[in-house]
Amino acid sequence: AFSLPKLLYSYNDLEPYIDAKTMEIHHSKHHNAYITNLNNAISGTSIENLSIEDICKNHSENMPIRNNGGGHYNHSLFWNILSPEGGGNPNDKIAELINSSFGCYDNFKEKFTNAAMTRFGSGWAWLCKVDNHVEICSTPNQDNPLMPGICKDDSIPLLGLDVWEHAYYLNYQNRRPDYVSAFFNLINWKEVNNKI
């Protein structure tokens, strides 16, 4: 059975960009609910011992598994690429990929922000490695680039931004642009590099 991952920081460590109450509810309630529902959906089936990546890649045709498996994978990645010491310009491999794919970091920020802002309703914006470059895409609900036919096949998610309202509404209300802008101050580029 899957379990709620422990965060590498406290709920209040991401302030002022993401407030402690939002982090607590988002992690301990929303993410935990996806895990509970996923465990219930796969219990006693042939896939209950598979990795979450395998479930997303190969078993997402079942909607309860798709929604809750995606919710678990997406949030686990999201927590890990956030850091109180995050932000600033990317470095090392990810900087090279961003520069070669988008021209410069500012162009990446503009395109990523656009993906997050134009995702209607609930969903995610993603930066993925595809072959020898990086691409930006967005997904509805709890879909992710590991699922077939969502972004480019063989996409490796490096960075994801949750644009469900529960990720920001307590502090930002309907101001998604402010939340998206704040996100860039928290990106753990070291962890992103570890995924390449």
Image (tube, helix red, strand yellow):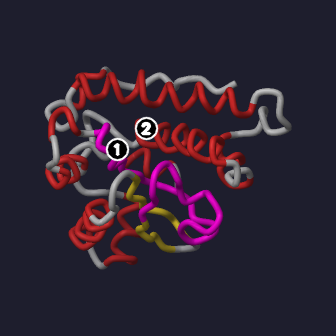
Query: On the image, which quarter does residue 20 sit in?
Result: top left
User: In the displayed structure, does residue 99 sit left or right of residue 155?
Assistant: left
Residue at the spot 55% in from the left edge and 60% down from the top edge: 145
Element under label 2?
A: helix
Question: Could you tell me which quadrant the N terminus lies in?
Answer: top right
Residue at the spot 40% in from the left edge and 27% down from the top edge: 27
Q: Mark 2 points at which residue?
A: 80
**Residue stretch in magenta:** 138-167
Residue 180: x percent and y percent? 22, 52
Task: Give the residue type that dot 2 points to.
Answer: Asn
Q: Mark 1 points at which residue?
A: 188
User: In the displayed structure, does residue 124 sit left or right of residue 32?
Assistant: left
Task: Give the residue type that dot 1 points to.
Answer: Asn
User: In the displayed structure, does residue 67 sit left or right of residue 29?
Assistant: right
Pointers 1 and 2 in contact (CB under 8 A)? yes
Badge 1 density bin: few <14, some 14–19, many ≥20, Cα 10 Å: many
Q: How far apart are marks 1 and 2 (CA)?
A: 8 Å
Residue 78: x percent and y percent? 42, 42
